[in-house]
């Protein structure tokens, strides 16, 4: 159970030199309309999720309240505005839980290591859940899978098929949710250890990768879930130990995020200072191959940096932005970019010297920027210096030449889900963005409008085949000559011409 209070430890000195000079740091910028400013809602920003209409919903820390960040008319999130959304059902105000944006555009959350029912934010490992519909701005309760008394700080993933898979934090159980009927079915046979503190990464072959954190018999063991069989198989040895667990079972059992990169490898970050790189196999029945990744620095006066819970995000240029801090739940936090070979320390937001990595959340935005929340009223945005490679861009192959207010259409192409889930944390929080957004820009005014997308033909990452998504044109869109783009993980397609009537 993590420390709830975050001590202010003072400004640090001597940050140490960057590990490499191959990466140019991006820049941090606070939102122009910050929380608690005049005319803005005042709340401690917790878990952010990107909705399929381009807005961002953010939970208040251990609260039933949620807020929406809407980009301005020029598409800027820095200049965006806040509004309050509908609240969770009574008695459900979780902290550290499973979360996902479903293919139909709704949002589901399950569990919570903590829950505030009016007597404070207390550890309960609840099995409650809720489903949010953006079209009605309302939540409804979701029952847990049969027999589950806990869900807690669980993992979740939307599989390539569109099914939602959820873990029970405290057992070896997983379950699949059939979204149209909202019914659960058991899955996940042969799991080698309990799910506690582990993260899930969706791979291009539709399997799901996890690193065991509770397998004391094999402290470097990894597994893959195969959707066709509904079971787990070995994914080999990570070679280096990633979780913070001692041989006798003591320790935090924490580890960091796992991020799939455009080259098909997974960058897995440990709570030990080590990292590992996984190369998936060409055959589902094979284990794949691991190799040691770079070690995080040991900075004088601060200690060995690692990620014992903490966020990472795949930037449009293929680098991984990650927040790390020394030990387990200690400050300060430093930010690094991993370029596939080495780690480079980059700039950090103003709050970083005073907080551990676990308070942070990184969310990829359609602009290619990354939004950062840390349980405070200061929401920051990181603008990376790099740009995507052309082969990584979505491609529009077929779509409407004319669109009208409030009408729905279908657009076809490739790489609409990107090459990765985008963001990662592990258990506690999931904010993947491997679903297509449709952006329309008026050529006369330059004003930007996001359509609400829903029910894409696939959620699979790295899908090279032809796919589609449905989208609804917003009622406030401007008329005239425009361009349409499909955006996945902050990377836009080449625009195509269309006219709004």
Image (tube, rainbow, N blue to C red):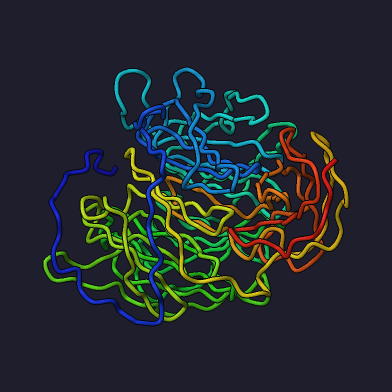
Nearest to the observer: residue 214 or residue 242: 242
Quarter of the image containing the C terminus? top right
Judge whether residue 169 can be spotted in this image: yes
Name the image quarter holding residue 114: top left
User: Which residue is pictured at 57% across the width and 43% down the height?
Assistant: 100
Nearest to the observer: residue 457 or residue 481: 481
Q: Give the image location of residue 437, x and y in percent.
A: 68, 50
Quarter of the image containing the N terminus? top left
User: Which residue is pictured at 45% across the width and 51% down the height?
Assistant: 371
- Taking the image as shown, residue 305 lies to the left or right of residue 54, namely left
- Taking the image as shown, residue 254 lies to the left or right of residue 447, namely left
User: Which residue is pictured at 73% across the width and 39% down the height?
Assistant: 477
Nearest to the observer: residue 447 or residue 353: 447
Q: Give the image location of residue 140, x and y in percent.
A: 60, 23
Name the image quarter holding residue 256: bottom left
Nearest to the observer: residue 160 or residue 29: 29
């Amino acid at each position: 159970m993590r420390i709830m209070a975050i001590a202010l430890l003072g400004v640090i000195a001597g940050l140490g030199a960057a590990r490499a000079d191959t990466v140019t740091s991006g820049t941090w910028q606070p939102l122009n309309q910050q929380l608690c400013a005049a005319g803005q809602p005042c709340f401690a920003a917790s878990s952010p999720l990107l909705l399929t209409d381009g807005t961002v919903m953010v939970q208040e820390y251990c609260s039933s309240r949620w807020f929406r960040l809407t980009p301005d008319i020029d598409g800027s999130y820095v200049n965006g505005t806040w509004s309050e959304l509908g609240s969770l059902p009574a008695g459900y105000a979780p902290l550290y839980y499973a979360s996902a944006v479903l293919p139909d555009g709704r949002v589901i959350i399950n569990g919570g290591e903590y829950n505030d029912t009016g007597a404070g934010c207390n550890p309960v490992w609840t099995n409650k859940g809720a489903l949010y519909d953006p079209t009605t701005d309302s939540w409804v309760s979701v029952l847990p899978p049969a027999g589950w008394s806990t869900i807690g700080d669980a993992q979740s993933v939307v599989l390539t098929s569109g099914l939602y898979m959820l873990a029970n934090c405290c057992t070896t159980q997983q379950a699949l949710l059939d979204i149209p009927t909202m019914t659960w079915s058991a899955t996940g046979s042969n799991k080698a250890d309990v799910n506690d503190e582990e993260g899930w990464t969706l791979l291009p072959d539709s399997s799901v990768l996890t690193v065991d954190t509770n397998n004391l018999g094999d402290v470097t063991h990894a597994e893959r879930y195969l959707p066709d069989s509904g079971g787990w198989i070995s994914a080999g040895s990570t070679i280096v130990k990633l979780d913070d667990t001692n041989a006798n079972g003591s320790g935090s059992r924490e580890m960091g995020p796992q991020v799939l990169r455009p080259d098909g490898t997974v960058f897995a970050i440990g709570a030990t200072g080590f990292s590992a790189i996984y190369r998936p196999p060409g055959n589902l029945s094979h284990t794949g191959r691991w190799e040691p990744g770079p070690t995080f620095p040991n900075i004088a006066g601060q200690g060995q940096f690692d990620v014992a819970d903490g966020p990472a995000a795949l930037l449009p240029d293929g680098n991984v932005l990650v927040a790390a801090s020394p030990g387990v739940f200690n400050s300060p936090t430093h930010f690094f970019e991993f370029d596939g070979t080495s780690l480079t320390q980059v700039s950090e937001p103003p709050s970083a010297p005073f907080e551990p990595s676990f308070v942070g959340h990184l969310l990829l935005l359609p602009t290619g920027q990354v939004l950062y929340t840390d349980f405070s009223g200061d929401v920051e945005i990181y603008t990376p210096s790099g740009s995507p490679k052309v082969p990584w861009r979505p491609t529009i192959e077929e779509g409407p030449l004319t669109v009208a207010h409030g009408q729905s259409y279908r657009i076809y192409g490739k790489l609409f889900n990107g090459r990765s889930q985008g963001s990662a944390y592990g258990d506690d929080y999931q904010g993947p963005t491997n679903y297509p957004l449709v952006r329309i820009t008026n050529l006369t005014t330059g004003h930007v409008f996001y359509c609400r997308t829903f029910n894409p033909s696939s959620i699979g990452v790295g899908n090279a085949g032809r796919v589609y998504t449905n989208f609804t044109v917003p009622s406030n869109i401007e008329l005239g000559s425009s361009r349409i783009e499909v955006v996945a993980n902050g990377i836009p397609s080449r625009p195509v011409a269309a006219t709004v009537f």
